[in-house]
């Protein structure tokens, strides 16, 4: 596999990972781009034949309505609702991630994309890799991203009583859009940023848990 194909996989993995931040937002952006509502450069002809429905106005309306409901849940107007949605999306995020990765690999490796045969051919004789592999990698990144942010949201709830959860949700939206757009123009940079975001989320969650445990131990020692 050559460099251009690795970049294509990196970019499609970033698209898949954005589903771990917000499941329906990247699908909504993809559909709006494929129907020429917003000029993001993802056209309907870039999509695999089986996923051409993503470029329909029905998909735009469905994903738009779903995202509006998803966004409302993460405003944390009703306590615990965001955590319930997090749990449900634990199963949906990998599926959406796989869908996004497969849908965008044709954009990033257009010269060797063959949706009918179910594979992508690397340029310069670099061999073939199945679309199933592309979907698996995107789904895996989405799952890792989502689990990391689930832990971060749980820590936020424990430390702030949920008051900061709405802000965390908005930040997730912003990062998802930024990664989605960056993957269009600089796939490798987007992939590096993705790894940095996941690492930072894990680091902050582990550190917050460690600090909380240290305070609990300090309080216990003080009592005794």
Image (cartoon, grey):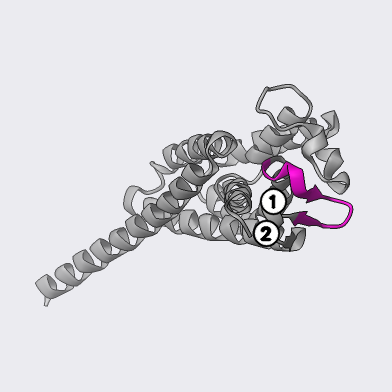
Circle 1 Cα neighbour tier, 10 Å, few/some/many (<14 / 14–19 / ≥20): some
Q: Which residue corresponds to mark 1?
A: 123
What mark, if any, has residue 184 been given in the picture? none
Q: Residue at x 53, y 53 (%)?
A: 83
Q: Which residue corresponds to mark 2?
A: 126
Find numbered disc 1 in the image and state the secondary structure of the residue it sits on. helix
Percent x, y of residue 8: 63, 48
Find numbered disc 2 in the image and state the secondary structure of the residue it sits on. loop
Please tell me in which quadrant of the rendered image residue 43 appears: top right
Give the magenta range.
Answer: 108-120
Cα gap from disc 1 to disc 2, whole angstroms? 6 Å
Q: Is residue 116 left or right of residue 180?
A: right
Q: Quadrant of the N terminus?
A: bottom right
Q: Is residue 88 visible?
A: no
Q: Residue at x 58, y 46 (%)?
A: 18
Q: Residue at x 71, y 33 (%)?
A: 42
Q: Is residue 49 left or right of residue 24?
A: right
Queried whether the magenta region covers residue 113, the answer comes back as yes
Q: Is residue 143 visible?
A: yes
Q: Quadrant of the C terminus?
A: bottom left
Percent x, y of residue 210: 27, 65
Q: Residue at x 42, y 49 (%)?
A: 197
Percent x, y of residue 103: 74, 46
Instruction: Farthest residue to the front: give it.
Output: 124
Task: Answer whether labels 1 and 2 touch (C-beta < 8 Å).
Answer: yes
In the figure, 130 relative to 110: above or below?
Answer: below
Percent x, y of residue 134: 69, 58
């Amino acid at each position: 596999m050559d460099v251009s194909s690795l970049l294509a996989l990196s970019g499609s993995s970033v698209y898949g990972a954005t589903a771990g931040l917000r499941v329906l937002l990247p699908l909504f952006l993809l559909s709006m781009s494929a129907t020429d509502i917003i000029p993001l450069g993802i056209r309907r002809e870039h999509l695999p034949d089986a996923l051409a429905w993503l470029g329909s106005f029905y998909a735009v309306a469905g994903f738009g309505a779903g995202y509006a409901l998803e966004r409302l849940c993460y405003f944390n107007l009703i306590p615990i609702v965001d955590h319930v949605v997090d749990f449900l999306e634990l199963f949906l995020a990998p599926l959406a991630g796989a869908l996004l990765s497969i849908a965008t690999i044709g954009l990033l490796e257009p010269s060797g994309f063959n949706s009918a045969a179910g594979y992508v051919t690397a340029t310069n004789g670099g061999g073939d890799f199945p679309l199933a592999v592309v979907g698996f990698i995107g789904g895996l990144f989405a799952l890792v991203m989502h689990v990391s942010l689930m832990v971060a949201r749980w820590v936020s709830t424990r430390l702030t009583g949920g008051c900061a959860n709405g802000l965390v949700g908005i930040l997730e939206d912003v990062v998802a859009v930024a990664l989605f757009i960056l993957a269009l123009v600089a796939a490798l940079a987007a992939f590096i940023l993705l790894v940095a975001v996941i690492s930072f989320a894990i680091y902050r969650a582990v550190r917050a848990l460690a600090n909380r445990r240290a305070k609990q131990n300090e309080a216990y020692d003080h009592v005794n």
